[in-house]
Amino acid sequence: MNLDILLTIIFAAILIGAARWMIGILFRALINLIGALVSAAGAIVLIVALVWLLNSMR
């Protein structure tokens, strides 16, 4: 087997492993971002509801 082919296969395996690792981290970050957006939306809804209640009590 040629040395260039062997090195290319090893390099490709390393790159595929790194790509899978980065995609996993990307998905995890995306899930965290969606969770943060949901939390922020919930907080905004609570603040709006509180302001609405305070204004309706006048």
Image: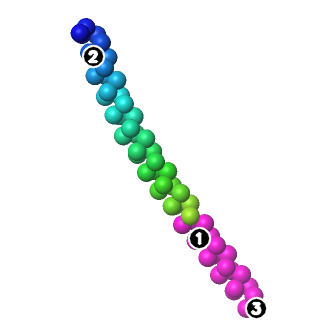
Q: Which residue is mark 1?
A: 42
Between the residue at mark 3 and the residue at mark 1, the CA separation in whole angstroms equals 25 Å
SS for callout 3: loop
- Residue 3 x/y as whole percent: 24, 10
Residue at the extreme front of the image, as rendered = 1
Q: Which residue is mark 3?
A: 58
Q: Residue at x 64, y 73 (%)?
A: 45
Report the side of 26 relative to 49 (left or right).
left
Q: Residue at x 54, y 66 (%)?
A: 39
- Verify CB contact (< 8 Å) between mark 2 and mark 1: no
SS for callout 1: helix
User: For the magenta stretch, what is the residue range?
Assistant: 39-58
| Nearest to N terminus: mark 3 or mark 2 | 2
Up-down: is 29 above or below 51?
above
Callout 1, which amino acid?
Gly
Q: Which residue is mark 2?
A: 7
**Circle 2: is it few (<14), some (14-19), or many (20+) Cα within 10 Å?**
few
